[in-house]
Image (cartoon, grey):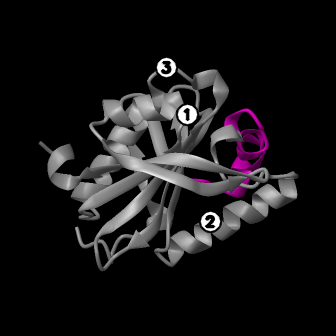
Amino acid sequence: MDKQKIKYSEISLQSTNLNIKALSKENSAALFSLYSNTEIQKYTDIELLKSLTDTQKFIVAENNEANNQDLIFLGIFSRATKDFLGTISLYNIDKKHSFASLGFQLAKDYWGRGVMHESLKVFIKFVFEELNFHRIEAQTFIGNERSIKVLNRLNFTKEGQLRQNFLIEGKFEDSYLFSILKTEFLK
């Protein structure tokens, strides 16, 4: 498929246990729970959401950026229960050079259950096969062992350490840069 013809805000993917699709205002309370939790946001540079109104505005803004093909921002939902589990995003999209950055977050109740591995596997396959991207990058803070484990399990390569590249709560933090190429993922 031509990546220019797919509306990013209308992407809907399925795996055995999950639905991965755009968020709507109806998902505000669940997203607020995820994006206002300091423990979950510990390893991100995302500004904590402070209210349901802020969350609704955030969803609208993300969907508008998706309509402009500036990012992909999707929710992860259980197929069995319809519960909201987390988010996946593709941002810093560079169409000329065919790469983007990957972001992902998961509600704490679902940590260690393989949810993120399953959802990322489906999402990354879509990005490479349907959107025809060549490279996906992911950055994670040095101490974020769960994210590092997921990226390693998906065959990402750790390219190096970025020194003090994020300012978090007044302190500069290091991160690792990971990447995966289309040819490495679709073997």
Q: Residue 104: x and y, percent?
A: 52, 45
Query: Does dot 2 land on a helix, a strand or a loop?
Result: helix
* Quadrant of the image containing the C terminus: top left
Quarter of the view holding residue 93: bottom left
Q: Earlier in the sequence, mark 2 or mark 3?
A: 2
Compared across the picture, whether 158 is left or right of 82 comes to: left
Residue at the spot of label 2: 62
Identify the residue at horizontal 51%, vertical 50% (top origin).
103
Q: Are marks 3 and 1 in contact (CB under 8 Å)?
A: no
Q: Which mark is residue 144?
A: 1
Q: Are marks 1 and 2 in contact (CB under 8 Å)?
A: no
Q: Residue 73: x and y, percent?
A: 54, 57
The kind of secondary structure the magenta stretch mainly shows is helix
Looking at the image, is 58 positioned above or below residue 76?
below
Instruction: Determine if residue 110 is in view.
Output: yes
Question: In the image, is residue 126 part of the stretch drawn in magenta?
Answer: no
Nearer to the camera, 122 or 141 = 141
Residue at the spot of label 3: 113
- Label 2 sits on what residue type? Glu
Disc 3 residue crowd, few under 14, some 14–19, many 20+, Cα 10 Å:
few
- Label 1 sits on what residue type? Asn
Which residues are drawn in magenta? 22-40
Compared across the picture, whether 3 is left or right of 73 comes to: left
Compared across the picture, whether 29 is left or right of 77 comes to: right
Marks 3 and 1, how far apart at CA: 17 Å
Identify the residue at horizontal 58%, vertical 24% (top origin).
110
